[in-house]
Every structure is written in structure tokens, then in C-alpha cells.
């Protein structure tokens, strides 16, 4: 089965993913979207996801033990 990505507005074609590795571009995007420190925001969200995942795994393991 062939997987097709539907992109009616052409966003995937418009984004140059190689440029996202450039620190200047990341800084400009963070200024554009009013993010003060992009690394801290990213780390905070990852930490929050890890805590959420850990809580759910503990909850599920307790349910399975009952």
C-alpha cells in the first residue's frame, strides 16, 4: 500500500528543512513567534511530556496489577 501525504496548500514544499538547522534562522523564527529562549521552551515541554508519560505508565501498571 502506497502512503501519500496530502498537502493541499503546499506547506511541505514551502519549508526548507535544511535551513532549520541554521542557528540564525532559528533565532529569527523565535523572534517572529515571540519565543525568548527556544531551547528552554523546548526543554520545558519535553520535561512536561516525560512527566505526563511517567504518570500514565504508573497508572496503567497499577491497573494491570489489580
Image (spheres, helix red, strand yellow):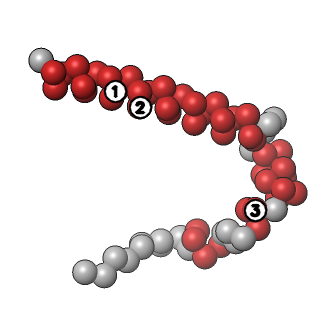
> How many residues crowd mark 3 within 10 Å: few (<14), some (14–19), many (20+)?
few
Tags 3 and 1 touching, CB below 8 Å: no
Checking the image for residue 28, the label placed there is none
x%, y% of residue 36?
A: 81, 35
Q: Nearer the viewer, residue 61 or 38?
A: 61
Q: At 41% across and 27% down in the image, what residue appears?
A: 54
Q: Quadrant of residue 47?
A: top right
Callout 2: helix, strand or loop? helix
x%, y% of residue 66?
A: 12, 18
Q: Nearer the viewer, residue 17 or 46?
A: 46
* For residue 60, side relative to residue 52 (left or right): left
Q: At 47% across and 72% down in the image, what residue appears?
A: 8
Q: Report the residue marked by disc 2.
A: 53
Task: Look at the image and tell me in which quarter the N terminus lies.
Answer: bottom left
Q: CA distance from mark 3 to mark 1?
A: 33 Å
| Residue 32 appearing in the image | no
Q: Quadrant of residue 10?
A: bottom right
Decide: is 26 above or below 9: above
Decide: is 26 above or below 64: below
Q: Report the residue marked by disc 1.
A: 56
* For residue 65, side relative to residue 13 (left or right): left
| Residue 57 appearing in the image | yes
Callout 1: helix, strand or loop? helix
Label 3 or label 1, whichever comes before in sequence order: 3
Q: Report the residue marked by disc 3.
A: 21
Tags 1 and 2 touching, CB below 8 Å: yes
Amino acid at each position: 500500500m502506497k502512503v501519500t501525504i496530502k498537502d493541499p496548500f503546499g506547506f511541505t514544499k514551502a519549508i526548507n528543512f535544511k535551513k532549520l538547522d541554521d542557528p540564525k534562522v532559528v533565532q529569527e523564527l523565535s523572534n517572529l513567534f515571540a519565543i525568548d529562549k527556544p531551547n528552554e521552551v523546548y526543554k520545558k515541554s519535553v520535561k512536561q511530556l516525560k512527566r505526563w508519560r511517567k504518570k500514565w505508565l504508573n497508572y496503567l501498571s497499577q491497573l494491570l496489577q489489580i
